[in-house]
Image (spheres, coloured by chain):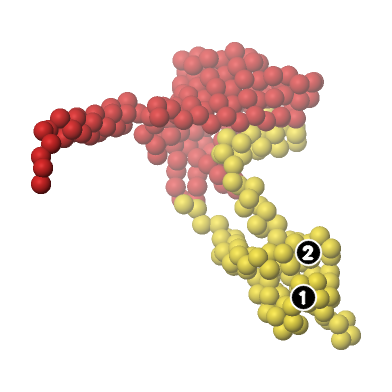
Amino acid sequence: MADHTVNVNKTIHAPIEKVFDAWLNPKMLSIFMMPMPGMPESDVENDAREGGNFTIIMHAGDDKLPHTGEYLEINPPDKLVFTWVSHSSVDNSTVTLNFTKIDDNKTNISLSHVKFIDEKTRSDHEGGWGNILDKLNDVMSQPVTTI
Amino acid sequence: MVEYANEKILTELLKAVSDTTRRSLLTQLCQQGASRVTDLADYYDMSLNGISKHIKVLENAGLVTRKTIGRTHWIEANIKRVSLVENWFKELKSIWELRLEKLDEILRNGGTQNG
């Protein structure tokens, strides 16, 4: 498989502009961008414009888990797209958020996180299968020997 | 990974409910409230000795408590303890879902001072 997608839909009980802004506000990000529940606030630095970068250092016990990315699309208050690089993973990925107003105090977030298998990993993988199929072809094309 | 303070307790709880009868017993006690040991024995068609062994395991894990009124033993589910298992089940979600739940929680409370 070339990619792997996680889709999450959630209703947030706040106005759409406020929900959108939370994704660009470092103070807000530091609270909800956690590695798992019950962990302390993350350290966030961001340059909130298209082409700008962000760094989120999450804390899990004594471990520091850096996550970085680039804002690809900032279209308030409807859409936000950024790359998402977890430094513990070789995969590259993109997170797309679509915001929809339900009413004045309710907003739906549709989140899609697509992980692409790293090019090198993928070519190694394909190379692996290629070698196996070549080998199989070699074996199959040998004249049948009787015992 | 991160060691939860409750990790050891959770292991004990899950061991205690790894048995079908004990799971059923706990369900019964949660749904129907405190029950007499004799009634539980009747309900499960077991000897007093048999049902007592199961209750003892749940008791040791803190999932049920025993009250003696006169000569009657009443067994009651400890809902607080059960919620430890529930909390773990709630964590079996995508991290993104958990982050969105957290975002909802902070925005419901009016956001932060700077937010």
| Along the line of sight, the residue nearer the viewer: A81 or A136 | A136
Q: Relative to A134, is A60 on the left or the right?
A: right
Mark 2 lies on a secondary structure that is helix
Amino acid bearing label 1? Asp
| Residue that mark 2 sits on | B28
| Along the line of sight, the residue nearer the viewer: A44 or B93 | B93
Residue at (39, 37) in percent of width and height: A89
Q: Which chain is red?
A: A
The reply to whether discs 2 and 1 touch (Cβ–Cβ < 8 Å) is no
| Residue that mark 1 sits on | B45
Using the image, tell me which numbered label, if any, was put on residue B18: none
Q: Relative to A111, is A102 on the left or the right?
A: right
Q: Earlier in the sequence, mark 2 or mark 1?
A: 2
Q: For mark 1, does the 10 Å Cα neighbourhood hold few (<14), some (14 to 19), or many (20 or more) residues?
A: few
Q: For mark 2, does the 10 Å Cα neighbourhood hold few (<14), some (14 to 19), or many (20 or more) residues?
A: some
Amino acid bearing label 2? Gln
Where in the figure is residue B77, as x and y percent of width and height? Answer: 77, 66
Q: Chain of mark 1?
A: B
- Vertical arrangement, residue A81 with respect to residue A44, above or below: above
Where in the figure is residue B56, as x and y percent of width and height? Answer: 69, 77
**Colour given to chain B in the rendered image:** yellow
Residue at (70, 57) in percent of width and height: B83
- Vertical arrangement, residue A48 with respect to residue B24, above or below: above
Residue at (64, 15) in percent of width and height: A78
Q: Chain of mark 2?
A: B
Residue at (61, 36) in percent of width and height: B97
